[in-house]
Image (tube, rainbow, N blue to C red):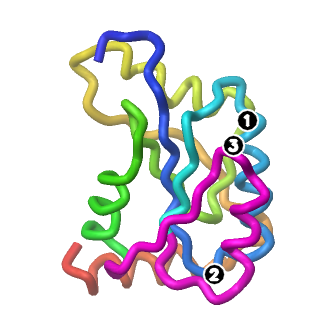
Amino acid sequence: MGDAALSISIVIPTLNAGRAFGTVLHRIMGQGQVPLEIVCADMGSTDGTRHIVSQFPLARFVEIAEPPGPKSWNRTMEVAGGDVVVFLAQDAVPGNGDWLTHLTAPFTDPSVGGVYGRHEASMESDPLSGFRLGQRFWDSGG
């Protein structure tokens, strides 16, 4: 992966993300480095998540049949078109405008296979959502 111009897909698993999700997408669009795409991998939302996604030209809504966890993440990797795939929780807000640049810079080194970066929980997020997501992960065979 030694190319400095790697394309980036941001993948966000969603399930009834709610209005706060618009804040997450706005912060992504405000990054100094613009991603190739934002893939919202939805697992059956019944709220306005699809409408929120439709307001952002780089974002696309993909329905995923698998339950939350490793299988759904693998399925989403199959539809992502970037050289690098960044996973972000639906209520995790990029900390600043250089978040994506700093997160993906190590991938110019071909020996790098994965990284982790800083993000913040949205002030509008459900404080128990992380706990519930963890439960679903382990219940699905994670």
Q: Nearer the viewer, mark 1 or mark 3?
A: 3
Q: Which of marks 2 and 3 is nearer the N terminus?
A: 2
**Front residue (pair 106, 46):** 46
Mark 1 Cα-neighbour bin, 10 Å: few <14, some 14–19, many ≥20: some
Magenta segment, which residues? Answer: 42-67
6 left or right, relative to 55 = left
Q: Residue at x 70, y 85 (%)?
A: 47
Q: Which amino acid does label 2 sit on?
A: Asn
Q: Residue at x 75, y 66 (%)?
A: 52
Which element carries disc 3, helix, strand or loop? helix
Q: Does the magenta stretch include residue 47?
A: yes
Residue 90 is situated, as x and y percent measured from the top left of the image, at 60, 64
Q: Residue at x 65, y 30 (%)?
A: 34
Q: Which amino acid does label 3 sit on?
A: Ile
Q: Which of marks 1 and 3 is nearer the N terminus?
A: 3
Disc number placed over residue 96 in the picture, else none:
1
Q: How many labels does the image show?
A: 3
Q: Pointer 3: what residue?
A: 28
76 left or right, relative to 45 = left
